[in-house]
Each structure stands twice: as C-alpha cells, then as structure tokens.
Image (cartoon, grey):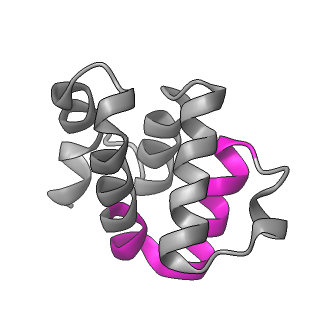
Amino acid sequence: MMASVSEQLLAALDELDADKLKRFKWHLKNHYGVSAADLEKADALDTVDLMMKRFGQEEAVKITLTAFRCLVPYILTRDSIHNALSCMMNQ
C-alpha cells in the first residue's frame, strides 16, 4: 500500500536537519503567507498538518517541491529531492 501524501510529505521533511527545516519554514512564511506564529514552534509533523489544512494535498506537494528546489544548495543532491517526492506527483 502506498503511503498517503501526508506521510510522504512528512518523510521528506524528516530528511531535513533542523537548519534545513528552518529554511523550509522560512520559505513558507515569505512566499506563501504562512504566519511566523504558526511556524515558530512547528516541527515537521506540525508543518505538514498546517500545509495540508491550509493548501490541500496538491498545493502542499507543489509548495514542497518548490521549496525543496530553493533548498538545493543546502541539500546534498537534486536526486534526494526527486526520490523523496516523485511518487507524490503521480497520485
């Protein structure tokens, strides 16, 4: 059975260390209008829940892909992004 979109997003965010998760949340705040208060103490699980509630599945995936592309200089390879998220786009 394939993992749900929420589970896949969580798995992708769980791959980020604290600094990269902070950069990801900065991207949400500055490009998608998510309030700093909502993100301040949010861990990966809270961040996924927030994105799913606010944007829905499809937009949450698109936002995650866009944010991860911006994080490429801070993540090992583009392949790690692709491998973590590619199956989400096929649902």
> Residue drawn at (45%, 48%), measured in percent from left and top?
9
Q: In which quarter of the image is residue 85?
A: top left
Task: Describe residue 35's horizontal placement relative to residue 41 as left or right.
Answer: left
**28 or 62, which is in the foreground?**
28
Judge left or right: residue 80 versus residue 67: left
Q: Which residue is drawn at 55% across and 45% down?
A: 23
The residue lying at 72 percent from left, 53 percent from top is 46
Location of residue 22 with respect to 47 vertically, above or below = above
Residue stretch rendered in magenta on the structure: 43-61
Q: Where is residue 70 in the image (x, y as percent from the top left)?
A: 33, 49
Q: In this view, does 77 lie above or below 22?
A: above
Q: Is residue 73 left or right of residue 50?
A: left
Q: Quadrant of the C terminus?
A: bottom left
Q: Residue drawn at (82%, 55%), measured in percent from left and top?
A: 40
Quadrant location of the N terminus in the rendered image? top left
Magenta stretch secondary structure, dominant: helix
